């Protein structure tokens, strides 16, 4: 079942406002549990984790910055 544009927009806000901070806490906690690796290893792990979190949510974020494709043209232009 495909999500509507409005549903994807709402889910993207939930993911960014709740999911991303929770993911950051988990990632930092895991890195702290592993000890302090060298700077380059730590940098590579954080860059990889920064990319990996978004991969499952690509379909939610795709097209969110665009106007609602289901809205009428007059509504998108801001005219009455």
Image (tube, rainbow, N blue to C red):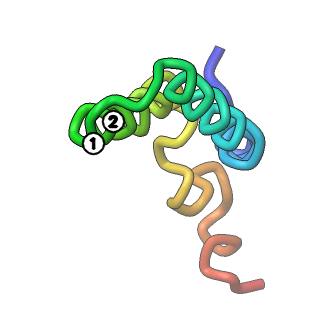
Residue 70, x across and y down, in percent: 64, 49
Relative to 29, residue 77 above or below = below
Q: Is residue 64 left or right of residue 37?
A: right
Secondary structure type for disc 1: helix
Q: Quadrant of the N terminus?
A: top right
**Residue at image location 53% in from the left, 42% down from the top:** 61
Residue 72, x across and y down, in percent: 66, 62
Q: Are marks 2 and 1 in contact (CB under 8 Å)?
A: yes
**Which circle marks residue 42 in the picture?**
2
The crowd level at tag 1 (other Cα within 10 Å; few <14, some 14-19, many 20+) is: few
Nearest the viewer among 33 and 70 is 33
**Residue at image location 49% in from the left, 22% down from the top:** 56
Residue 10, x across and y down, in percent: 76, 44
Tally the numbered discs.
Answer: 2
User: Please, which residue is most extreme toward the bottom here?
Assistant: 79
Q: Is residue 69 left or right of residue 41?
A: right
Spatial CA distance of label 2 from label 1 is 5 Å
Secondary structure type for disc 2: helix
User: Please, which residue is most extreme toward the left here?
Assistant: 40
For the question of whether residue 48 can be seen, the reply is yes
**Residue at image location 47% in from the left, 33% down from the top:** 54
For the question of whether residue 8 can be seen, the reply is no
Q: Quadrant of the C terminus?
A: bottom right
Nearest the viewer among 80 and 35 is 35
Relative to 27, residue 50 above or below = below
**Residue at image location 52% in from the left, 60% down from the top:** 65
Residue 24, x across and y down, in percent: 60, 38
**Which circle marks residue 39 in the picture?**
1
The crowd level at tag 2 (other Cα within 10 Å; few <14, some 14-19, many 20+) is: few
**Which circle marks residue 55 in the picture?**
none
């Amino acid at each position: 079942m495909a999500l509507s544009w409005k549903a994807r927009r709402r889910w993207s806000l939930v993911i960014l406002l709740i999911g991303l901070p929770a993911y950051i806490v988990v990632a930092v906690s895991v890195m702290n549990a592993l000890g302090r690796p060298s700077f380059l290893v730590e940098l590579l792990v954080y860059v990889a984790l920064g990319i990996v979190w978004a991969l499952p949510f690509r379909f939610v974020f795709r097209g969110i910055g665009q106007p609602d494709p289901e809205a009428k043209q007059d509504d998108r232009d801001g005219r009455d």
